Amino acid sequence: MTFKIAKKFPRLEHPETPLSPGLDPMVPMLLVAAAVGFVGSLAVELFRTTMYAIVRFYSSHDHLVAAARSLPLWARVAVPAIAGTASGLAMWAGRRWIKRPRGPEYMEAVHVADGVLPLGPNLVRTGSSLIGVSGGITIGREGTMIQFASLASSLLGRIFRADESHRRLIVACGAAAGFAGAYHAPIAGTLFVAEIILGGLALREISAVLVSAVIAELTTEALFSTGPLYIAHVLPRVGFNDLFDASLVGLAAGLFGPVFLWLLQTSNRRYQSLFTFLPLRMGLAGLAIGLLSVARPEVWGNGFSVMQSFLSTHWALSAIVAVFLLRLAAVTIASAAGIPGGVLTPTLVTGASLGLIIGYTMLTPWADHSQTLWMLVGAGSLLAATTHAPAMSAIMVFETTHNYHVVLAALPACVIASVVGSLLRHHSVYTEALGLGEHGSAASAAVRRTILPGSTPFHLRSSAVEANDDDTRVA
């Protein structure tokens, strides 16, 4: 089914304090977007700071891989198991306390709902995710950060008494702010919203999203941290021979991306049917991740430390392959258990490992700049293969490292990966997370809405949103 948009954006209304009559509605929307960016960055930092505080209860290190390495082997196994069980208990108890199994995630709120994110279910999901990621569960924390920033923006939309279409745009701005605050990547955050959440944006609407992302990044840099997310070698200029090698990496990522998505989806369906009690299911997943981390502590966490280590130190091929396989198993287990979080950063790390393996076996691996180039191209390519968003993926690996020259190699690789990945598997990780894939179950048709006026139509193959309350993955 295709939703066709026939109307323009309605005016952003505030019944008690009306906006100036005759004023272009996008002018006050830009002010709202700036406020959303500021609040979204604070929400991201609140989550990050709380996570570090929890980690310090059992380790003197902030980063999870360093924390895992400092623990004795029994504790390295026990901490993820306890965290998984506690995360499941929080989710299980929260659902019974609020008597509502789940609320829409930010993509659902923009695509098919009314731009309202209910407070209770989202706080329960955020708390459960916070416990899990703080205990080393191999899941992305950035997805929950984006969801939390979107929740804050949804509350702002209600405070400003925006109409439905503007509430959806405000939540989209919150997602961009959360992305920018989490990754220090405002342009990629804008493209994330434009390519993935909305499927395209008119220039009038994209300005609000961009303002929100930029304000979030400026707030993060001014109040909390500066510089790129990852520190990397400065890459030399890219030549035509590098484009050929990058295309090879993109092709490999395009072939592996659908396999990765199939693995996540199949394991999710089969594992959740075996264990219906959330604390047991998540606790067993944490135990499995802890056992895997005995072999390599790099199994812990979303993969931030692994990415930084890939960029700054020389790795042997055997170690790269081991981390690739162990983390792939751990991410699959965490996702299958339904532990709330995201797979964006784990996908980047998996793609970086894939790029390094191809570089070592088929390209020129020995120079430091070559190792940096192929891991970044691999990271962006696998992200493009799973999200079908090549522009966002290529810009993201540039913004997170401030390495401009990587874009010239990453763009063609990401396009190839996205095309190959979409040909082999039509739906991306986000359409399947929304329940819009081939196996999405039907929910009430009442949740269907048009997408934001002014954006391109979004094609739905299933009748409505996934109703499974165990599917808590975001981003």
Image (spheres, rainbow, N blue to C red):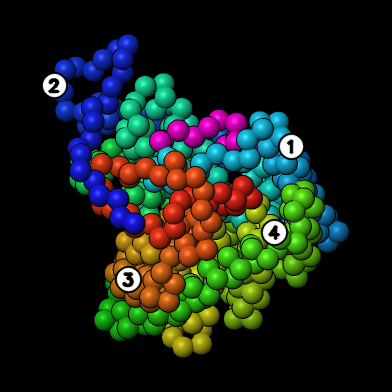
Distance between the Cα atoms at labels 2 and 1? 50 Å
In the rendered image, which quarter is residue 272 located in? bottom right
Contact between marks 3 and 4 (CB within 8 A): the answer is no
Distance between the Cα atoms at labels 4 and 1? 18 Å
Query: Which residue in the structure is indicated by mark 4?
Result: 272
Q: Which mark is residue 415?
A: 3
- What amino acid is at disc 1? Ala
Q: Residue lying furthest left in this view?
A: 22
- What amino acid is at disc 2? Gly
Query: Which residue in the structure is indicated by mark 2?
Result: 22
Distance between the Cα atoms at labels 2 and 3? 43 Å
- For the point 76% across and 57% down, the residue is 275
Q: Which mark is residue 93?
A: 1
> Is residue 130 at all visible to an observer of this figure?
no
> Is residue 23 part of the magenta span, yes or no?
no
* Label 4 crowd (10 A; few <14 / some 14-19 / many >=20): some
- For the point 37% across and 42% down, the residue is 449
Vertical relation: 288 (above or below) 216: below
- For the point 45% across and 69% down, the residue is 382
- What amino acid is at disc 4? Gln
Q: Residue lying furthest bottom in this view?
A: 362
- What amino acid is at disc 3? Val
* Label 1 crowd (10 A; few <14 / some 14-19 / many >=20): some
Numbered disc 3: secondary structure: helix
Residue 251, position in %: x, y? 40, 80
Residue 356, position in %: x, y? 51, 76
Numbered disc 4: secondary structure: helix
Label located before the other in sequence (2 or 3): 2
